Image (tube, helix red, strand yellow):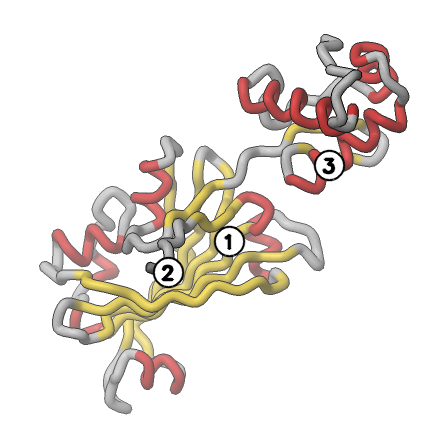
Amino acid sequence: MSNLVRTQPVALYYQIQQDLRARIKRGEWKAGDRLPPEPELAARYRVSRITVRQALARLVADGHIERRQGTGTFVRAEKVAQRTGLLTSFTEEMQHRGLEPVTRILDFQIRTPPEHIQKILRLSPTDEVAYLERLRIANGEPLALTEAFLPARLVPDLQHTLLVDGSLYRTLEEVYGLELAEADEEIEAALATGKERRFLGVKPGAPILQIIRTTYLATGEPVEWVRVAYKAERFKYYLRLKGRR
């Protein structure tokens, strides 16, 4: 395994880091696999354990591996990348990534909305909303907890309507004939609540990626306000920036 170039000015730990990273990417070690212990890696690369430790520390910082006390170092599951600039649902995004999405409906109500939701959705004091809380799962792993508010008059009998392929957006388009045109989205880091920890399986103090989205119809009318709590260790946002000219 020792193919390090010792005469070039690139640090040995960096070369080891890149080699291990490439092997993980090629699938030589898959998510959940245990890496060889430090002494074995040091012998394979013919370097000191300190050098190996530096390489592993970089891979931990990059999110490729994780240390588990008393058991060793393991490959972490690759983060799911969410594309920006596209109005897609969780179901559509997971299918695009080749993952199998599953949705568990935790709660459904027709109710009076909180005051801030009433303002965002431009509702009158007597208007009701459909409230939908769901656990979003990909390849058997809980990834996100969502709560959505929709004007009840736009989605009559939603509780009796099967979500098309598990996707609320497809249901809005294909069942209710609503044209989803655009959305405003806010992204920020937050700490998981007790409920989020329970459903997402994260530890106290664990971060989440919180996304708040307001979706609009082609007429400009708001049709949905949703808050999504993503498991931060498994999710990242991807965007491409254009030049200033």
Q: Amino acid at mark 1?
A: Tyr
Circle 1 or circle 2, nearest the eye: 2
Q: Residue at x 40, y 84 (%)?
A: 116
Q: Amino acid at mark 3?
A: Arg
Indicate the quadrant containing the N terminus: top left, top right, bottom left or bottom right: top right
Q: Is residue 175 left or right of residue 162?
A: left
Q: Earlier in the sequence, mark 1 or mark 2?
A: 1
Query: Which residue has dot 2 on it?
Result: 244
Decide: marks 1, 2 in contact (CB < 8 A)?
no
Q: Quadrant of residue 184?
A: bottom left
Circle 3 or circle 2, nearest the eye: 2
Decide: marks 3, 2 in contact (CB < 8 A)?
no
Query: Which residue has dot 1 on it?
Result: 230
For the residue pair 102 and 185, the one nearer the viewer reads as: 185
Q: Amino acid at mark 2?
A: Arg
Which percent across, then down, holds residue 40? 83, 14
For the residue pair 139 and 17, the one nearer the viewer reads as: 17
| Whether residue 194 is visible | no
Which percent across, then down, holds residue 41? 80, 16
